[in-house]
Image: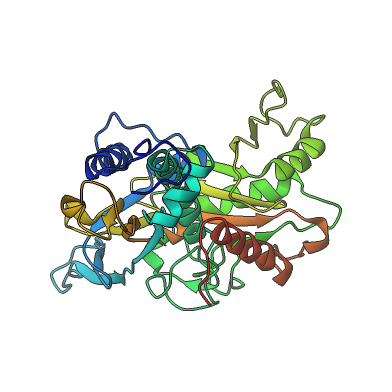
Amino acid sequence: MNTGSLTNGSYIVTGEQVTDTLDNIQAGLDAVNDKTDEYEYKNADYNMMLNHIEEVKGRDGEKLTYEDWQVFFQDAGVALSPREYNETYNEWTLHCKEFESKNGSFTPDFIKKQIKNHKQPLDILLKRSEGIINKYENVFKPNYLWEAILEVPTSGGGYYEKFGALRNTTVDESLLEDVIEGATDGAKGSLVRNHFRAITNSSGVEASDYQAIKEYFAEYIGIDVNDLVSAGSLGTENILRGVFTDTIMVDDNIVEGELPAIEGIPFRKSKMLPDGIVCFYIDGFDNAIVAKLTSDIKEYTGLNFVVEKDNNKFPTTLGEVQGAKFIIEDIGYQVIGRHQLLFLDITPDNADANGQMKPAGFTLLERKRASLNRQWKNVVR
């Protein structure tokens, strides 16, 4: 390869060097996709939901089936026939997508440019590849998960018809401890459940707002409100701390600026939520909150890469090779534990006497979701 004004042969790029570089990239990918228990996720926002993800192996359109059943006793009597065991089956249809990026091309122009800048071309490609891996690990994975969590479904429908927290959704009577005839839709005791809430007083968030959330979750069979936790942004934490610092509503003293709990509900900081929105979820519940669909073929899970020209056919000196595509193999997240997740808008201007989230609250969620998507995805026009 003619390297111009540099000493002849000083920057010869061989097929062996390229192979070594790609081997280093593959080693990094192997670490990212390591499925052993020893691998520790460093992103707190991803880790927050890690124990509440149900992994499903399959392809786009995979069915996830659940059995709902009821059994009752009744007074014994010769003339009475006991009610039979009742079971129904419901299913989700899960979806997944794949995404790709590229670390560059091993073209003569690229190599010449790097050499003129006194840089080793393969070091640049390795650096770019490491950047792609870091983007996948620290941006894509948490953001893509939380995009699913922040999804706002359309109003109405049944539990298994949509994904996301319940929004004026009719649930089966077997899900609630008690049903109140004539209860207002979305209120306590109603079969129509709404997990998009707002504070009730325009003067700001109060202890009663948190108490109402606890009581609402307590209506569900199988849910222990002692497992209820909350999450919010730093801006949300500042609002809550400003309101609750000097009252008995904070369960423990604030230590080093941390807000431990309000009304017995621990608070966790998250960068995945908009200011003014508190996310409540059940931490420790047996059933999953999110379903994660990935391929049932191990080679096609996680982050992979494909060399666009077979490096085994490289000449002694590199001519033109198109580098490598990095592919995020088929992956999809959908919220299926819909009654285990709730959002509360604590913005005073968005208060509602009935505790129902207003359009402004939905806008906050949708805007944040779009922001998370923009951080990793380039929209092709």
Residue 157, x across and y down, in percent: 46, 78
Q: Residue at x 44, y 56 (%)?
A: 109
Question: In the rendered image of this protein, does residue 324 appear above or below residue 185?
Answer: above
Q: In the rendered image, which quarter is residue 334 located in?
A: bottom left
Residue 99, x across and y down, in percent: 38, 63
Visual colour scheme: rainbow
Q: Residue at x 36, y 53 (%)?
A: 106
Question: 340 or 236, which is in the foreground?
Answer: 236
- Asked whether residue 53 is in view, the answer is yes
Question: In the rendered image of this protein, does residue 69 appear above or below residue 19?
Answer: below
Residue 266, x across and y down, in percent: 58, 35
Residue 220, x across and y down, in percent: 45, 55
Question: In the rendered image of this protein, does residue 106 appear above or below residue 8?
Answer: below
Q: Is residue 197 left or right of residue 241?
A: left
Q: In the rendered image, which quarter is residue 104 located in?
A: bottom left
Q: Is residue 59 left or right of residue 167?
A: left
Q: In the rendered image, which quarter is residue 363 located in?
A: bottom right
Q: Residue at x 23, y 45 (%)?
A: 15
Count every numbered label the image shows and give the total.
Answer: 0
Question: 88 or 337, which is in the foreground?
Answer: 337
- Asked whether residue 340 is in view, the answer is no
Residue furthest toward the right? Answer: 203
